Amino acid sequence: FLGPYRPFMVGRFTGIFNNPNALGITCAIFLPLSLWQFLETKKKSALFLCFMIVASLLLSAARASMSAVALTLGYFIFKYSKKNRPLILFSSISFIFILFWLTETLIKHVFKVYIRSETISVLGGRLEVWPVALSIMSDKPIFGYGFGTEELLLPLKGITLLKGAKITLAIWKDYGLYVHNSYLGMLLQLGIVGFILFFAPFFILLFKELSLRQDIPVPSLRYALQASLIAGLIIAFYESFLYSVGNAYTFPFWIIVMLLFFYQYYDKAKDMPEST
């Protein structure tokens, strides 16, 4: 509210960002770590930080980020509380059913306005852009058009195909016309070769983290980092942010990735026999 930018955009809270979705991504990545800090320290300051992140996320109304948080927080809490897992599972299922009932009855109209139901069918215009991006990518599928060309390709090659895409042109004309999908954006820029080289380490890391041995102690921080990784990979399906290193939410995400790689190498070092 005190920053140089307007705090709300079309009724959605932006914070210090110029886009509410950017705030949503930041909240989704940091929330598992913030919750871990509170559970470990029980400090009021940590609880306050959690509250502020949740409030900012809800005010941003970032649908992809909220969906990612719902999944990853459930994962983290389930992993963190080994003794209470049946209760957590039952509580989560009950909460989902109660929320579904509320959104279909008492708060149906308010909920539809909040989630912007009129644009869900095209995912806020994304389903208007993705086919065009795939069509452009098909001309150079192996190596793509070069890194950094995403914001140039759609205006140059796809604008004629988007004449009927009213939502896309209305929402994104002031923010640049890009794919809003990190996976498709990488395919468009660096082709299939670049896509594999870039994303293979992510999913290999995720597979290794999710298949950790159950008979070894795992630091609770590692579960929080895993949750943040999953959140980032989910949101990447709706936002082109993974390769925009240096901004306020991509840089912390890469730090999280590097910390998980550190844990992987630490595990290998422990399993190696001591040198004589």
Image (spheres, helix red, strand yellow):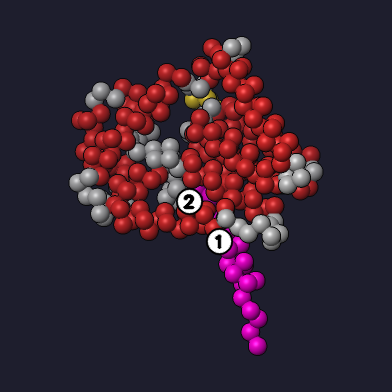
Question: Can residue 48 be seen?
Answer: no
| Neighbourhood count class around disc 2 (C-alpha, 10 Å): few under 14, some 14–19, many 20 upward | few
Choose mark 2 or mark 1, whichever is in front. 1
On-image quarter of the C terminus: bottom right
User: Residue 152: within the magenta?
Assistant: no
Magenta region: which residues?
248-276
The amino acid type, in three-letter code, at marker 2 is Gly
On-image quarter of the N terminus: top right
Left or right: 24 as drawn, with respect to 43: left
In the rendered image, residue 107, in percent from the top left (x then y), is placed at 59, 13
Tag 1 residue: 261
Report the residue at 67% width, 27% height from top: 94
User: Residue 273: within the magenta?
Assistant: yes
Residue at the bottom extreme of this rendering: 276
Assign a secondary structure to mark 1: helix
Instruction: State the separation of the CA atoms marked 2 and 1.
Output: 20 Å
In the rendered image, residue 182, in percent from the top left (x then y), is placed at 40, 44
Would you place residue 264 above or below residue 240 in this image?
below
Report the residue at 35% width, 35% height from top: 176
Report the residue at 23% width, 39% height from top: 135
Assign a secondary structure to mark 2: loop
In which image quadrant can residue 231 be found? top right
